[in-house]
Image: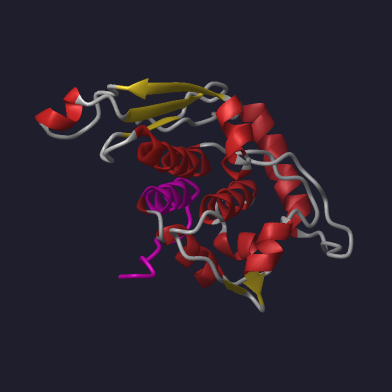
Amino acid sequence: MARRTFVRPTGERRRHDHQLGQQSSTVFDFEKPVSRPPHPAALTDEELLSQCEYIQGRTGGPGGQHRNKVSTGVELTHLSTGVHARASERRTIRENRPVAIRRLRLALATEIRTPVPVGDIRSDLWKSRCRDGRIVCNPSHHDYPSLLAEALDVLEACHWDSMKASSRMCCTASQLHKLIARHPPAWTLLVRRRAEWGHSPLKSPGG
């Protein structure tokens, strides 16, 4: 699956650099949260599916000859971004559907970035999952893709500077890295984007 990237024009990038400099010197007022539109990975199942093309039947996914004969696969394409996911390894459409939705959420969280304004942008979910600087969420939990998207959005806004991003999210950089490392494609993205911005290499938290 090709990763969607948004290339910022040179002039706009300079303005963004200036805005980031202003953000880095700002003392965030955590008594006055700043709202922003939800990331697509954080939508309810119903909201997300309403934005997708839904195909069920033979999806052409991996599997044996018998599996390809049985029309139980599910494929989802998020129409506004083109990000897609499929599942066909379970025996029924009912079983494959939630698997495809979760894979789509993880793909959206990793590939799609949404704007982050100045201020305290932590969601209620993030605040409930991050206590005393520690992020608590099993990667198999329904909340994980939403937290991952939020973390990556803030990292993008901070030019992939983990210290600045963790400061905005009220956690440590190591906690931020552990959260992202639980989804290997997201960790690969973090390592690559940090290198592009000239940051020091990272060692995997599990390594």
* Magenta highlight range: 185-207
Pick whichever, 91 or 22, lies toward us. Answer: 91
Residue 96 lies, in percent from the top left, at 36, 38
Viewed as shown, does residue 172 lie left or right of 70? Answer: right
Pick whichever, 33 or 164, lies toward us. Answer: 33
Residue 168 lies, in percent from the top left, at 70, 61
Viewed as shown, does residue 90 lie left or right of 119? Answer: left
Pick whichever, 76 or 123, lies toward us. Answer: 76
Q: Does the magenta stretch include residue 100?
A: no
Q: Is residue 171 visible from the viewing direction of this image? A: yes
Viewed as shown, does residue 16 lie left or right of 193? Answer: right
The relative height of residue 77 versus residue 106 in the rendered view (above or below) is above
The relative height of residue 182 versus residue 84 in the rendered view (above or below) is below
Query: Which residue is at 39% across, 27% downward?
Result: 75
Q: Is residue 169 visible from the viewing direction of this image? A: no
Residue 77 lies, in percent from the top left, at 46, 25
Q: In which quarter of the image is the C terminus?
A: bottom left
Residue lying at the far right in this picture: please name it: 32
Q: Quadrant of the N terminus?
A: top left
Query: Which residue is at 52% across, 44% downward?
Result: 109
Query: Which residue is at 64% across, 33% downward?
Result: 47
Residue lying at the far left in this picture: please name it: 65
Display coloring? secondary structure
Query: Which residue is at 63% across, 59% downward?
Result: 165
**Number of numbered discs visible in the structure rendering:** 0
Residue 177 lies, in percent from the top left, at 48, 64
Residue 29: quarter of image: bottom right
